[in-house]
Image (cartoon, rainbow, N blue to C red):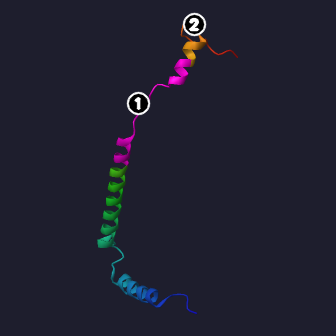
Amino acid sequence: MPDMSASASLAMTHLATLAKEVDEDKVTPGVLGFIVFAVMALAVWALMKSMSKHMNKVDFKESPDEEASDKETTDSPSGKTSPAKG
């Protein structure tokens, strides 16, 4: 059983011939590098837009806890709580 499939073998032979044509002193990212960079940039933009949308839904104002305020007023006659001991 061969280690590589036919398509992988074919791709390797084409890449090997392309590698021979490339000047070793001039290597550039080319079109594939641009496409990968553009896709990554679009993904980051989409994630930032989604995060902004979710952050706008968050309500940062805390509502007062009614049970805690009722307990404080009933425990202390002046409405102030004494510091914890210990």
- Residue 75 in the image, given as x and y percentages of width and height: 60, 13
Residue type indicated by callout 2: Pro
Of circles 1 and 2, which is in front?
2
- Residue found at the far right of this picture: 86
Pointer 2 local density, CA inside 10 Å: few below 14, some 14–19, many at least 20: few
Residue nearest the observer in this picture, 57 or 66: 66
Residue drawn at point x = 55 percent, y = 91 percent: 2
Q: Which corner quadrant holds the C terminus?
A: top right
- Residue 85 in the image, given as x and y percentages of width and height: 68, 15
Residue 22: name its quadrant. bottom left
Q: Mark 2 points at which residue?
A: 77
Q: Name the residue under label 1.
A: 61
Residue nearest the observer in this picture, 27 or 4: 4
Residue 85: image tag = none
- Residue found at the far top of this picture: 78
Magenta stretch bounds: 51-70
Up-down relation of residue 61 to residue 16 (above or below): above
- Give the CA separation, mark 1 to mark 2: 29 Å
- Residue 18 in the image, given as x and y percentages of width and height: 35, 83
Left or right: residue 85 versus residue 23 is right
Residue type indicated by callout 1: Lys
